Image (cartoon, rainbow, N blue to C red):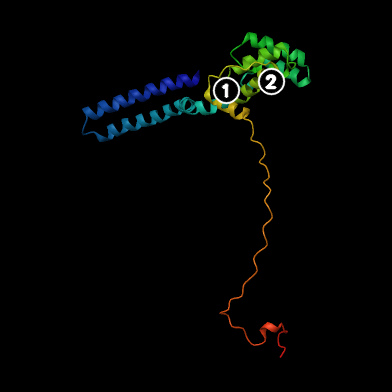
């Protein structure tokens, strides 16, 4: 709330100073020092306003890329009921964890933390696991969506429809791609023996070379 208020106030001050500087520069053409002072104040106010707008603009630019990996992460929800659910999960009380996750999911269905925790602790092939996996599939976290798809397809024989986020579908296609088989070893036939070397008649040998005598023997 404070950041929004500063954003509005500093932006308004920047616009007013810029308007005043433009009016002074048109009315007082010979007073360069005053005109430069108004423009300097406008630049300082604009720099301060840009600091308040930078987080919002950065989220707008990087959100489509980073949001696919972090949107819908369970760590973003830190309510008291989620904290209690995590404590039960850490102690190994899986049934109580599933019950608390179900209650939190009904209470706040727009947050994914309860559904992810419930999906990870529900009994395999149970009705609650299918409900939690269906809910997790509707969010944008790539890893959770892939796990939810595996649970629905392998344990419940239900393949969900295409996800609204294309990157999730591309990741899922890469995950479901069957690896190619190992290449077969090709047996090569043995190589034929090398042909005998032929002596070139143009090469003249020293006397006694063809007798096989030792080196230095007369």
Rendered position, 199 above or below 177: below
Task: Tell whether 53 sits left or right of 114.
Answer: left
Q: Looking at the image, which is closer to me, 1 or 100?
A: 100
Which residue position holds label 1?
Answer: 71
| Residue under the point 61% across and 30% down | 177
Which residue position holds label 2?
Answer: 154
Mark 1 or 2: the one toward you: 2
Say whether marks 1 and 2 touch (CB < 8 Å). no
Q: Looking at the image, which is closer to me, 46 or 104?
A: 104
Instruction: Indicate the position of residue 82 as horizontal and vertical percent values.
Output: 68, 16
Q: What element carries label 1?
A: loop
Task: Tell whether 193 sits left or right of 138.
Answer: right
| Residue under the point 58% across and 27% down | 173
Q: Is mark 2 on a helix, strand or loop?
A: helix
Q: Quadrant of the C terminus?
A: bottom right
- Other residues around mark 2 within 10 Å, as few (<14) / some (14–19) / many (≥20): few
Instruction: Indicate the position of residue 186 as horizontal and vertical percent values.
Output: 67, 46
State how far apart marks 1 and 2 are (Cα): 25 Å
For marks 1 and 2 on the same chain, the one whose residue lies earlier in the sequence: 1
Residue 30: image quadrant is: top left
Instruction: Indicate the position of residue 16 as horizontal and vertical percent values.
Output: 33, 23
Instruction: Indicate the position of residue 149 as horizontal and vertical percent values.
Output: 64, 20
Residue 66: image quadrant is: top right
Rendered position, 213 above or below 25: below
- Other residues around mark 1 within 10 Å, as few (<14) / some (14–19) / many (≥20): some
């Amino acid at each position: 709330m404070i950041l929004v208020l500063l954003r509005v106030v500093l932006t308004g001050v920047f616009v007013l100073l810029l308007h005043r500087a433009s009016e002074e520069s048109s009315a007082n053409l010979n007073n360069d020092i005053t005109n430069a002072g108004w423009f300097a104040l406008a630049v300082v106010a604009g720099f301060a306003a840009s600091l308040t707008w930078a987080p919002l603009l950065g989220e707008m630019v990087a959100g489509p890329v980073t949001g696919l990996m972090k949107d819908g992460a369970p760590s973003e929800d830190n309510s008291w009921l989620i904290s209690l659910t995590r404590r039960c999960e850490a102690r190994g009380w899986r049934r109580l964890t599933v019950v608390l996750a179900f209650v939190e999911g009904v209470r706040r269905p727009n947050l994914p933390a309860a559904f992810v925790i419930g999906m990870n602790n529900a009994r395999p092939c149970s009705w609650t696991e299918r409900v939690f996996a269906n809910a997790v599939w509707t969010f944008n976290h790539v890893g959770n969506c892939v796990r939810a798809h595996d649970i629905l397809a392998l344990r419940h024989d239900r393949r969900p429809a295409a996800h609204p986020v294309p990157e999730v579908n591309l990741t899922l296609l890469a995950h479901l791609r069957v690896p190619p088989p190992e290449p077969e070893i090709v047996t090569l036939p043995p190589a034929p023996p090398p042909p005998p070397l032929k002596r070139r008649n143009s090469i003249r040998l020293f006397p006694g070379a063809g007798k096989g005598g030792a080196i230095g023997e007369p």
